[in-house]
Image (spheres, coloured by chain):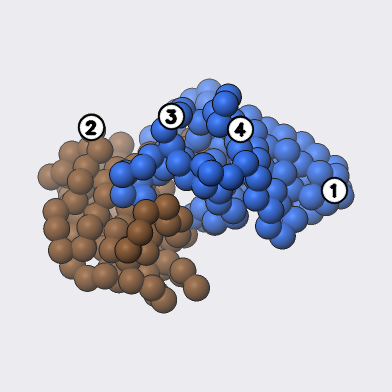
Amino acid sequence: GESVGLHLPTLSVQEGDNSIINCAYSNSASDYFIWYKQESGKGPQFIIDIRSNMDKRQGQRVTVLLNKTVKHLSLQIAATQPGDSAVYFCAENLPGGGNKLTFGTGTQLKVEL
Amino acid sequence: GAVVSQHPSRVICKSGTSVKIECRSLDFQATTMFWYRQFPKQSLMLMATSNEGSKATYEQGVEKDKFLINHASLTLSTLTVTSAHPEDSSFYICSASRGGSSNQPQHFGDGTRLSIL
């Protein structure tokens, strides 16, 4: 059933601008982090991952930053395009957890023309 | 690589019906598959972890007799919602990860929209 009144945090950006999506993770022992993109009616799509021994990783138009001190993860999207409009989730993995992930609450990214 | 196929994409059925959802890894062997449930505008909630050849591990609060999981091969896991009722209506998503080492990303299917009348 649907939970009335819930809504996702929304980030609105102009096409061509850079987007920064933030995530606070819960467990200081987590050692692997992933960003996923979910379009309406579809499953999450892998974007980029980072291990806890790194603080930055870059992909094509995307950069993930990890700050273990404050348990913060961010996803930066350069030159945001209309096709980037989606819900973005961060996920964390605990060591010994058998690749089991805990997902964040998600952020809706809206790209305005 | 890492394509996961989920079938069917949408099911509408009467209350009391049992519904089976299939999850297949098409181009890799998946030692572990995961089943999630997602309500509108919410995050993914893990229901169970499915390991090939062994019993699934269910999350707290998920009824194992209600949500039957079978992982008979390295490329196929099934979720059966038994005697479904309107409150079981949701978006069910599976994922699969390669075996062999930790810190492997999960790759997701495109979900099954289940609507119970």
Circle 1 packing at 10 Å, graded few (<14), some (14-19), many (20+), is: some
As measured in the structure, the alpha-carbon distance from the residue carrying label 1 to the one carrying label 2 is 43 Å
Query: Residue B112's image quarter?
Result: bottom left
Residue depth check, mark 2 versus mark 3: number of the one nearer the observer = 3
- Look at mark 2 in the image and give the residue it sits on: B61
- Look at mark 1 in the image and give the residue it sits on: A15
Q: Amino acid at mark 1?
A: Glu
**Whether label 2 touches label 4, CB < 8 Å:** no
Residue depth check, mark 4 versus mark 3: number of the one nearer the observer = 4
Q: Earlier in the sequence, mark 3 or mark 1?
A: 1
As measured in the structure, the alpha-carbon distance from the residue carrying label 4 to the one carrying label 3 is 13 Å
Q: Residue under mark 2: which chain is it in?
A: B
Chain that is coloured brown in the picture: B
The numbered disc on residue A67 is 4
Q: Residue under mark 3: which chain is it in?
A: A
Q: Is residue B11 placed above or below B88 in the rendered structure?
A: below
Are the residues flagged by discs 3 and 1 from a single subunit?
Answer: yes
